Amino acid sequence: MAKMSKSAGNIIDPFVLIDKYGAESLRYYLMSDIATGKDADFSEERLIERYNADLANSLGNLLNRSLNMIHRYSPDFRKRQVDVSIPGDWWPSSAWREALPRFAACMNSAEFSQALREVHVFATSSDMFIESVKPWILAKDPKRLGHLWEILYQLVESLRIIAILISPVLPKAAHGIFDQLNWKMELSGKEERFSLADAQWGKLPDGHVVGKPVPLFPRIEK
């Protein structure tokens, strides 16, 4: 494909794309699909595919499913000991343990596209966790209520951390997630709003009450 230039008349107007898809959709595509400092092909179709796959289908689905299950099964969920019958490496807390240092290393080396890949993998693994443990079955067994609580806690804590990790690229979406989680961060007065210390596991308190889900990433139809 030809390089963009004014003389060739193939410059893409970012303001037109923002009007069509929104600033955060465009920013996410540019940061996640194009490696910093390298030449890359720009594709409007690829922008739509990346948005739908990573945000609408993956993160948006995880947010809606998790909050819907909490309101349906256990609005006053609390932390409990994990179910030993579920392999430890399936739990989102285990996936977080692997994802956070890789995310930090990528951000420190300005590999932003790979950093967002790590967030996407973390979100996808949390969504797959739902299919593995089937909370809708646990909800029918009063003896396993504690395990159900722990599963729901892990999902919401995953969403809280994901919102922090995507906030440099998707600040509006991050605060949309915080609003639905009913989570208010205390500002420290420092120049940076969030740090990796805020993304440590377990900061969500026992008995936290979440809000109701609102579609945050509507699909873009081609």
Image (spheres, helix red, strand yellow):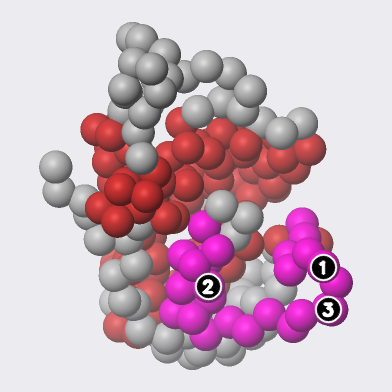
Q: Is residue 70 left or right of residue 119?
A: left
| Number of residues whose C-alpha sits closer than 10 Å to that of mark 3, classed few (under 14), some (14–19) or many (20 or more) | few
The residue pinned by badge 3 equals 188
Q: Position of residue 124 (x, y in %)?
A: 43, 46
Q: Amino acid at mark 3?
A: Ser
Out of 141 and 21, give the one closest to the viewer: 21
Residue 163 is inside the magenta segment: no
Residue at screen point 76% across, 80% down:
187
In the image, what residue type sits under mark 2? Answer: His
The quadrant of the picture occupied by the C terminus is top left
State if disc 2 and disc 3 touch (CB < 8 Å): no
Q: For marks 1 and 3, give the CA distance.
A: 9 Å
Kind of element beneath mark 2: helix
Residue at left 52%, top 57%? Answer: 170
Q: CA distance from mark 2 to mark 1?
A: 17 Å
Q: Is residue 202 above or below residue 126?
A: below
Q: Indicate the amino acid at tag 1.
A: Glu
**Which residue is denoted by mark 1 in the rendering?**
191
| Residue 141 appears in the figure | no
Q: Residue furthest front?
A: 7
Task: Give 35 or 134, whichever is nearer the viewer.
Answer: 35
The stretch in magenta equals: 170-196
- Residue 117 coordinates in the image, percent (x, y): 53, 36
Q: Quadrant of residue 216?
A: bottom left
Image position of 40 (left or right of 131): right
Q: Which residue is mark 2?
A: 175
Residue 151 against residue 34 in the figure, above or below? below
Q: Residues within 10 Å of mark 1 (few under 14, many from 20)?
A: few
Question: Which one is in front, 200 or 180?
Answer: 180
